[in-house]
Amino acid sequence: MVTFLVRRLLGLVAVMFALTVLVFLIFFETPGVDPAVLMAGRHPDPQTIKNIKHEFGLDRSLPVQYGLMMKHLFVTRDLISYGTRTKVIPEIISATPVTLSLVIGAAVIWVVFSIVLGLAAAVLRGTIWDPLLMVLALIGISMPVFWLGEIVNLFTQSRWHGFFLFSWVPPLGYTPLTQDPLKWFEGLVFPWLTLSVLYVGFYARVLRANLIETGSEDYVRTARAKGISERRVLVRHNLRTSMITFVSLFGLDFGILVAGGALLTEVVFALPGVGLLTYNSLTSLDLPVIMATVIYGAFFISLASALVDLLYAWLDPRVRPA
Amino acid sequence: MAVFEPEAEGIVLDVEETGGDIVGRSPWALAGRRFLRNKLALAALGLFILIVAVSLSAPLYAKHVAKTDPFKSNVTGTVTIDGKTIDVIQEGTGKLGLGETPIGPTWKSQYFIGADGQGRDVAARVLYGGRASLFIGFGSALLACLLALVLALVAGYFAGATDLVISRLMDLIWAFPLYLLAISLATVLLARPTDKPLKIGPVTLTAGSLWIPLVIIGLVYVPYVFRPIRGQVLSLREKEFVEAAVAQGAGSFRLVFREILPNVISTVVVLLPLMIATTILTESALSYLSIGVQAPKASWGTIIEDGQGLLYTRPWVAIAPGIMIVLTVLALNVLGDGLRDALDPRSKVRMK
C-alpha cells in the first residue's frame, strides 16, 4: 500500500508539472501571440506592457519564464488583473465556497435520486422504469445546461413566479450560508436541480446495469441460498459491489465540476463562483484571471483523480499493484 | 440470464428462404440490413437529415420567406401584419414602460418567432446559426476522429516507445479539464486585433473565422476517440490474421492499411455521430461564453446568448435555438446507438 501511495503521489506531481507546462506553452508560446499585450487587457498603455515583460521575464529563456509564472501563481500569489486592478488569487479563493455550495448540493441530489431510480429499475426490470430511465438519460446528455437553466429561470423568475409554488424563489444571485442559511438554500434549489438533471439518468442507468451484472454472481446466489431476505441481499451484497463504478465516475465528475465544469450553471444563475469569475474575465479577455483559474482548476482535478484512485485501492485491494 | 439479440438467427432464416443458395454478404451489408430494421434509428437519421436540409436552406428562407437580411440590424424598420404596420422595435411593454422591446412571434412568414434586440428575424438567424453549428460540430468531430485514428494506428502498431510518448500526451490532454483547455486555446487565439490575422504556417485565421472554434474543439476531443481505438489496434496486432499476413511477408503499410484499419473503421463510424453530438454541445457552450463563434456570424449558442437579455419579455429568441440543439443532439445520440447495434451486435447484450 505504501509503495502504491508513493507511486501515485509521484504520478500526481508529474501530471501537475506537465499540466502547468502545457498551460504555460499555450499562453506564452503560441506562435504569433504576444503574451504581454494579452495580459495588459483591452486597452493597454506601453508602460504596462513593458512592466509585464519585465515581471514575467518575457525577454529571457523559457525555463526562467516558466519559473516566474509559477512564482507569481503559487509563491508570491500577486498576479494582478489588469482589467479590474485586483489581486487574482484571493478573488478565486473567496469565490470557491459558492462553487462548492452549488456542486455539493447538486451532487447530493443526483446521487440520492440515481441510486433510488437505479435500484427501482433493476428490481422492476422490463417495466415502465426502463424506458423512463432511458429517456431521462437521453435528456440529460442532450440538453445544454445553460439553456435548461434559462428555461427554468423563465418559469420560476417570471412566468410562474406569481403562482404559489414558485413565489418563494428569490431573485438570481447568491446569499452566503453563514449570512442566512434559508436564503442560501432557497437561492440554490433550482441551480441544484438543473445541474443534477444532467447526471441523474446516466448514473441511474450505470447503476442498473451494474446491479443486474453482479446480481448473477455466485456470492449473491450464495447469499440468497443462505436464506437472507431479498432486500438485504440487494442492499448489503449486490448494491455494495455495484457502487464501485458509480463511486469512481462520481469522483471524476465531481472534480471536473468544482474545477470549472459548473461554469455554465453559475453563469445562467448568476452565482458568483469561480466559473462566473472565469466568465467575466473571458468577456473582457482578462488573461491573468483566466490563467489562474485554469491552473487552479487543472490542479484540483488531478488531485481529485489521485484521491479517487487511493479510495479505490483502499476499497478494493485487487487494484493495488504488488 | 444474458441472452443475445437473435439477429443472427434472422440471417440464417433468410438463407433458408432462398432455397439453400447461400449468398455471401459483406459485414457492411449485414450491418446495413440490421440498421434498416431499426425504426428508431431510421427516424433519428431522418430527423437529422431534415435539420441539416432546413439549415442549408437558410439563405432561401431569408430571401423568400422572411424577406430580410438576418445579419443587418433593423431597429427602425416596420413590418406589415394583417394589413397593419407595426414597428419591429416597439416602445417598452414592461411594467414601467421603459426601454424597447423587439416584436414578438407573429407566427406569419415574416418575424415568425419575432425579432432579437437589433430587430433581426430570429427564425432566419436560427437557420443560419444551424449552418455554423453543424459545420463546426461536423468538422471538429471529423478532425478529432481522423487525428485520433492516425495517432492510434501509429501508437498501436509501433507500440513501445512511440506508443508511450503518444499515449502520455493523450493522457495529459485527457487530464486537462475540457472546458478549461478550450477556454485557454480560445483566449489566446481570439484575443487579437481583427486587422492582425493569426498566421500558423500557410494558414491564416481571422478572429471571426469559424475554423478557430472548429480546430479548438477538434483538438480537445482527440484523446476521447484515441483511447478506444488504440486499445483495439493493440489487440488486433496480436490476432492470427495479422500474424498470417506477416508470415506472407506483408510490410508495415499493408499491415496497417489492409489488415488493421478495416477492423477499426466500424468503431470510428459508431463514434462519429456521438462525437458530433458532443461537439455541437461544446460549440454552443463556447459560443454562449462568447469564445466560440464571433459576431457578426451566428450559431445556436450565440443566439441563446443574444436571447438571454430578452428572456422574460421575448423568450422565443433563446428557446428556439435551444430546441434545435436538443433535437439535433438527441437525433445523433439515437443514431449512434443504432449504428453500434448494427455494426457490433455483440455489444447488444440484453437482460431478460
Image: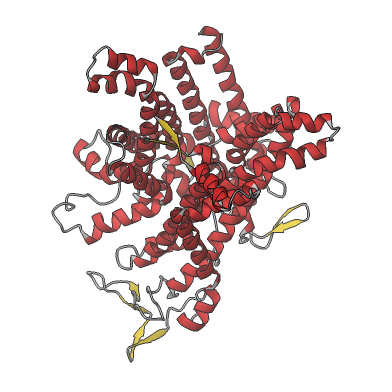
Q: Position of residue B14 (x, y in %)?
A: 54, 50
The quarter in which the N terminus of chain B is drawn is: top left
Q: Single out the residue that lies furthest toward the front.
A: B19
Which residue is nearer to you in this view: B264 or A207? B264
Residue at the image position 49 percent from the left and 65 percent from the top:
B51
Residue at the image position 57 percent from the left and 45 percent from the top:
B343
Which residue is nearer to you in this view: B31 or A285? B31
Q: Position of residue B233 (x, y in %)?
A: 68, 34
Residue at the image position 17 percent from the left and 49 percent from the top:
A168
Looking at the image, residue B135 lies above or below residue B248:
below
The quarter in which the C terminus of chain B is drawn is: top left
Way the structure is coloured: secondary structure
Residue B284 visible in the current orientation = no
Quadrant in the rendering for residue A202: top left
Whether residue A42 sits left or right of residue A124 in the image: it is right
Which residue is nearer to you in this view: B48 or B94? B48
Quadrant in the rendering for residue B163: top right
Whether residue A141 sits left or right of residue B267 in the image: it is left
Q: Position of residue B242 (x, y in %)?
A: 75, 32
Whether residue A246 sits left or right of residue A68 in the image: it is left
Q: Position of residue A147 (x, y in %)?
A: 38, 55
Q: Single out the residue that lies furthest toward the left.
A: A164
Quadrant in the rendering for residue A246: top left
Looking at the image, residue B13 lies above or below residue B249:
below
